[in-house]
Image: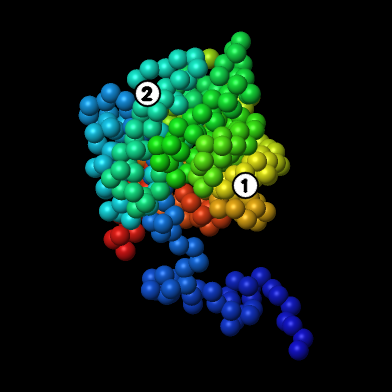
Amino acid sequence: MKMKQISNNSLANGSYFPNMRLRRLRKSKALRDLLQETRISTDDLVYPLFVEEGLKTAKDIASMPDIQRIPPSKIVDVVSEILDLGIKGVVVFGIPSKKDEAAKSAYNDNGIVQKSIKTIKKHFGDRIVVISDVCMCQYTNSGHCGIVNDTMVDNDSSIEVLAKIAESHATSGADIIAPSAMMDGQVFAIREQLNDAGFNDTSIMAYSAKMASSLYTPFRDLANSIPTFGDRKTYQMPFTNSLESLREIELDIKEGADMIMIKPALPYLDLICKAREIFKLPLCSFSVSGEYALIKAAAEKGWISETDVMIEFLTSIKRAGSDIIITYFAKKMAKVLLEK
């Protein structure tokens, strides 16, 4: 049958392919819900937990509304709330009372993260997955993610310390070790250290493509990890380089990563999508503090609906291919899901 020539009028009035009307699939909420392609559940969400050594009461951080540093005494209460909402994972960050050049408190068996992990595991066991962030920026005088030598972060001495930190976290009971310092060879060094210490079954979630992003600023307020000099561009990824990001992911996999991460999430949905297509490991995306703060600030001005934008943004991260989303909105999103 000869096709009719398409005219602007026929396209405008719907007479071309008149039987094809996608709006039929959208005519009611029930139908839209039935046909929804991408769904977020509480099983996808991980909540970042910030515990400060020596703190007595929870501390607000101006750049991160509704997110607090919590004292060790409140860990059980906070994790109980998280579990009640259906969230099954936390990533633990510690703010120590002392810092030094060698980040010694980061691998102290009685350090703030180590104690926090032990507390969580003692009270909740396998009901919750504990991910431990392995880095040094909260623990060094410099605020850098590695050991500084003559104003430069030294890669090889840094990975030795990172491996010690990882072992101390595994000894404390962490389920997943998440190295975030972006040192070359850190995953291999940590895998070897864990295996030698008998932690062959402890997983590694590599911060494989962690960009040198301006969106980390509120986190640095929250974690007290602002660099005292320079920046982190010599070890974190240039956000312009997608091919280099894929090479970083591939190297981490070869070194022994069980899961991979892209951070931040929203500006790098293209990388999440590419990584999902190429690599078959579980993929985590970290929706970072700046993403959270931008939404909160615009909502406070009345310019957007915080809930609607949160849902849209988190759905886009899931749609791009993320299996796991670390987000400061985890509790709020979980409450929305419970209300549905």
Q: Residues within 10 Å of mark 1 (few under 14, many from 20)?
A: many
Question: Disc 2, disc 1: CB below 8 Å?
Answer: no
Asked if residue 284 is positioned above or below residue 225 in the image, the reply reads below
User: At numbered mark 2, what does the secondary structure look like: helix, strand or loop?
Assistant: loop
| 187 to 12, vertically: above or below | above
Q: The C terminus appears in which quarter of the rendering? A: bottom left
- Mark before the other along the chain sequence, 2 or 1: 2
Residue 73 in the image: x percent, y percent? 24, 33
> Among all residues in the image, which is located at the extreme right?
2
Residue at label 2? 96
Q: Which residue is mark 1?
A: 271
Query: Which mark's residue is nearer the viewer, 2 or 1?
Result: 2
- Identify the residue at horizontal 43%, vertical 59% (top origin): 40
Describe residue 74's horizontal placement relative to residue 96 as left or right. Answer: left
Whole-Å distance between the Cαs marked 2 and 1?
34 Å
Q: Mark 2: which amino acid?
A: Pro
* Three-letter code for the amino acid on which mark 1 is drawn: Leu
Determine the secondary structure under disc 1: helix
